Amino acid sequence: MSSSQPLVETLAADLQPYLDRPYAFFGHSLGALIAFEIARQLEQSPQSNLIHLFVSAHAAPQIANTDPPIHQLPQADFIRKIADLNGTPDEILHHAEMMELLYPILRADFAINETYSYRPGPALACPISATGGLRDSMVTRPELEAWAEQTHGPFAMRMFPGSHFFLNEVRPLLLRILAQDLLQSLSRFQGNPASHGFS
Protein backbone atom coordinates (compact mmCIF):
# COMPACT_ATOMS: atom_id res chain seq x y z
CA MET A 1 0.00 0.00 0.00
CA SER A 2 1.68 3.21 -1.15
CA SER A 3 -0.95 5.94 -0.64
CA SER A 4 -2.33 7.22 2.63
CA GLN A 5 -6.10 7.16 2.12
CA PRO A 6 -6.59 3.40 1.61
CA LEU A 7 -4.30 2.75 4.58
CA VAL A 8 -6.22 5.20 6.78
CA GLU A 9 -9.58 3.72 5.80
CA THR A 10 -8.38 0.17 6.45
CA LEU A 11 -6.93 1.01 9.86
CA ALA A 12 -9.97 3.05 10.89
CA ALA A 13 -12.24 0.13 10.02
CA ASP A 14 -10.03 -2.35 11.87
CA LEU A 15 -10.13 -0.16 14.99
CA GLN A 16 -13.92 0.09 15.16
CA PRO A 17 -14.43 -2.77 17.69
CA TYR A 18 -12.13 -1.00 20.18
CA LEU A 19 -13.55 2.52 20.05
CA ASP A 20 -16.31 2.18 22.65
CA ARG A 21 -13.98 3.58 25.35
CA PRO A 22 -11.62 6.56 25.55
CA TYR A 23 -8.60 6.19 23.27
CA ALA A 24 -5.60 8.14 22.02
CA PHE A 25 -3.13 7.85 19.15
CA PHE A 26 0.64 8.24 19.05
CA GLY A 27 2.45 8.52 15.74
CA HIS A 28 6.13 9.08 15.02
CA SER A 29 7.36 10.45 11.70
CA LEU A 30 5.06 9.04 8.97
CA GLY A 31 3.04 7.49 11.80
CA ALA A 32 2.12 11.01 12.96
CA LEU A 33 0.55 11.75 9.59
CA ILE A 34 -1.37 8.46 9.57
CA ALA A 35 -2.51 8.92 13.18
CA PHE A 36 -3.76 12.41 12.34
CA GLU A 37 -5.76 11.23 9.32
CA ILE A 38 -7.29 8.34 11.30
CA ALA A 39 -8.17 10.78 14.10
CA ARG A 40 -9.87 13.11 11.60
CA GLN A 41 -11.90 10.25 10.18
CA LEU A 42 -12.93 8.82 13.55
CA GLU A 43 -13.82 12.20 15.07
CA GLN A 44 -16.59 12.49 12.49
CA SER A 45 -18.52 9.97 14.57
CA PRO A 46 -21.08 11.69 16.83
CA GLN A 47 -19.89 9.54 19.73
CA SER A 48 -16.13 9.94 19.30
CA ASN A 49 -14.11 8.84 22.34
CA LEU A 50 -10.80 10.19 21.03
CA ILE A 51 -9.17 12.03 23.93
CA HIS A 52 -5.68 12.89 22.64
CA LEU A 53 -3.41 12.86 19.60
CA PHE A 54 0.35 12.62 20.09
CA VAL A 55 2.49 13.48 17.06
CA SER A 56 6.25 13.13 16.89
CA ALA A 57 8.97 14.18 14.45
CA HIS A 58 6.72 15.23 11.58
CA ALA A 59 5.73 18.62 10.22
CA ALA A 60 2.10 19.63 10.55
CA PRO A 61 0.10 18.16 7.66
CA GLN A 62 -0.81 21.50 6.09
CA ILE A 63 2.89 22.20 5.46
CA ALA A 64 3.92 20.93 2.03
CA ASN A 65 6.83 18.50 1.93
CA THR A 66 9.59 20.18 -0.09
CA ASP A 67 12.31 17.59 0.54
CA PRO A 68 13.56 15.79 -2.60
CA PRO A 69 11.62 12.51 -2.85
CA ILE A 70 13.58 9.32 -2.33
CA HIS A 71 10.97 6.58 -2.77
CA GLN A 72 11.79 6.18 -6.47
CA LEU A 73 15.57 6.16 -6.11
CA PRO A 74 17.54 3.09 -7.20
CA GLN A 75 17.77 0.53 -4.41
CA ALA A 76 21.36 1.25 -3.36
CA ASP A 77 20.75 5.02 -3.20
CA PHE A 78 17.50 4.53 -1.32
CA ILE A 79 19.15 2.33 1.31
CA ARG A 80 21.94 4.90 1.76
CA LYS A 81 19.32 7.56 2.45
CA ILE A 82 17.64 5.26 4.99
CA ALA A 83 20.98 4.69 6.70
CA ASP A 84 21.52 8.46 6.96
CA LEU A 85 18.39 8.77 9.12
CA ASN A 86 19.96 6.59 11.84
CA GLY A 87 16.65 4.88 12.57
CA THR A 88 17.47 1.44 11.21
CA PRO A 89 20.22 -0.56 12.95
CA ASP A 90 23.29 -1.32 10.86
CA GLU A 91 22.81 -5.01 11.65
CA ILE A 92 19.54 -4.91 9.71
CA LEU A 93 20.80 -2.70 6.88
CA HIS A 94 23.62 -5.18 6.24
CA HIS A 95 21.48 -8.29 6.62
CA ALA A 96 20.47 -9.29 3.10
CA GLU A 97 17.50 -11.46 4.07
CA MET A 98 16.09 -8.89 6.48
CA MET A 99 16.43 -6.12 3.92
CA GLU A 100 14.73 -8.25 1.31
CA LEU A 101 11.69 -8.26 3.60
CA LEU A 102 11.92 -4.65 4.77
CA TYR A 103 12.93 -2.92 1.55
CA PRO A 104 9.47 -2.86 -0.10
CA ILE A 105 7.87 -1.79 3.20
CA LEU A 106 10.31 1.08 3.66
CA ARG A 107 9.86 2.21 0.06
CA ALA A 108 6.06 2.13 0.44
CA ASP A 109 6.31 4.15 3.68
CA PHE A 110 8.30 6.86 1.95
CA ALA A 111 5.94 6.81 -1.03
CA ILE A 112 3.00 7.48 1.32
CA ASN A 113 4.82 10.31 3.05
CA GLU A 114 6.14 11.92 -0.12
CA THR A 115 2.87 11.75 -2.08
CA TYR A 116 0.59 12.83 0.78
CA SER A 117 -1.81 15.61 -0.15
CA TYR A 118 -3.41 17.56 2.68
CA ARG A 119 -7.17 18.09 2.48
CA PRO A 120 -8.38 21.09 4.53
CA GLY A 121 -11.02 20.20 7.09
CA PRO A 122 -12.29 20.98 10.59
CA ALA A 123 -9.69 21.03 13.34
CA LEU A 124 -9.77 18.20 15.85
CA ALA A 125 -11.65 18.59 19.13
CA CYS A 126 -9.08 16.61 21.11
CA PRO A 127 -5.79 18.07 22.40
CA ILE A 128 -2.61 17.57 20.40
CA SER A 129 0.85 17.10 21.90
CA ALA A 130 3.77 17.48 19.50
CA THR A 131 7.31 16.31 20.22
CA GLY A 132 10.55 16.70 18.32
CA GLY A 133 14.31 16.30 18.47
CA LEU A 134 16.50 19.37 18.89
CA ARG A 135 18.94 18.03 16.29
CA ASP A 136 16.36 16.72 13.83
CA SER A 137 17.41 17.96 10.40
CA MET A 138 14.14 16.76 8.84
CA VAL A 139 11.64 18.72 10.95
CA THR A 140 11.94 22.29 12.24
CA ARG A 141 10.46 23.72 15.41
CA PRO A 142 8.03 25.99 13.48
CA GLU A 143 6.84 22.96 11.48
CA LEU A 144 6.03 21.20 14.76
CA GLU A 145 4.41 24.30 16.27
CA ALA A 146 2.07 24.45 13.26
CA TRP A 147 0.26 21.36 14.61
CA ALA A 148 -1.53 23.84 16.90
CA GLU A 149 -3.68 24.82 13.91
CA GLN A 150 -5.11 21.29 13.79
CA THR A 151 -6.94 21.38 17.13
CA HIS A 152 -9.64 23.45 18.80
CA GLY A 153 -8.38 22.05 22.09
CA PRO A 154 -5.16 22.59 24.01
CA PHE A 155 -1.82 22.19 22.28
CA ALA A 156 1.54 21.36 23.83
CA MET A 157 4.93 21.08 22.16
CA ARG A 158 8.11 19.74 23.71
CA MET A 159 11.60 19.40 22.29
CA PHE A 160 14.05 16.72 23.41
CA PRO A 161 17.76 16.07 22.94
CA GLY A 162 18.42 13.97 19.86
CA SER A 163 17.79 13.76 16.13
CA HIS A 164 14.89 12.34 14.12
CA PHE A 165 14.69 9.21 16.25
CA PHE A 166 15.17 11.09 19.53
CA LEU A 167 12.53 8.89 21.18
CA ASN A 168 15.04 6.04 21.32
CA GLU A 169 17.36 8.23 23.39
CA VAL A 170 14.85 9.71 25.86
CA ARG A 171 12.27 6.94 26.09
CA PRO A 172 11.68 6.95 29.91
CA LEU A 173 11.29 10.75 30.04
CA LEU A 174 9.09 10.82 26.95
CA LEU A 175 6.81 8.09 28.31
CA ARG A 176 6.40 9.94 31.61
CA ILE A 177 5.39 13.14 29.82
CA LEU A 178 3.00 11.37 27.47
CA ALA A 179 1.40 9.60 30.44
CA GLN A 180 0.89 12.93 32.22
CA ASP A 181 -0.82 14.47 29.19
CA LEU A 182 -2.93 11.36 28.71
CA LEU A 183 -4.06 11.25 32.34
CA GLN A 184 -5.07 14.92 32.18
CA SER A 185 -7.11 14.33 29.03
CA LEU A 186 -8.69 11.19 30.46
CA SER A 187 -9.63 12.99 33.67
CA ARG A 188 -11.16 15.85 31.71
CA PHE A 189 -13.04 13.45 29.43
CA GLN A 190 -14.46 11.47 32.35
CA GLY A 191 -15.57 14.68 34.04
CA ASN A 192 -17.15 16.06 30.89
CA PRO A 193 -17.17 13.77 27.82
CA ALA A 194 -18.26 16.71 25.66
CA SER A 195 -14.92 18.46 26.18
CA HIS A 196 -11.28 17.46 26.11
CA GLY A 197 -8.16 19.17 27.28
CA PHE A 198 -5.45 19.92 29.74
CA SER A 199 -6.53 21.26 33.11
Image (cartoon, rainbow, N blue to C red):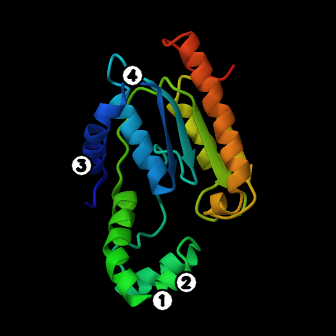
Question: Against 73, is 25 above or below?
Answer: above
Three-letter amino acid code of the residue under disc 2: Asp
Q: Which residue is mark 2?
A: 90
Say the numbered circle drawn on residue 113. none
The foreground one among 13 and 81 is: 13
Question: Against 123, is 106 above or below?
Answer: below
Alpha-carbon distance for marks 4 and 2? 42 Å
Residue 60 location (% of width, % of height):
52, 45
Dot 4 falls on a residue whose secondary structure is loop
Three-letter amino acid code of the residue under disc 3: Pro
Residue 64 visible in this rendered orientation of the protein: no
Three-letter amino acid code of the residue under disc 4: Ser
The residue positioned 46% from the left and 43% from the top of the image is 62
Q: Which residue is mark 1?
A: 94
Q: First in sequence: mark 4 or mark 1?
A: 4
Mark in the foreground, 3 or 4: 4
The residue positioned 67% from the left and 64% from the top of the image is 163
Q: Which residue is mark 3?
A: 6
User: Are circles 4 and 1 on residues that touch, CB within 8 Å?
Assistant: no
Q: First in sequence: mark 3 or mark 4?
A: 3
Alpha-carbon distance for marks 3 and 4? 21 Å
Q: First in sequence: mark 2 or mark 3?
A: 3
Mark 1, Cα crowd under 10 Å, few <14 / some 14-19 / many 20+, is few
Q: Which residue is mark 4?
A: 48
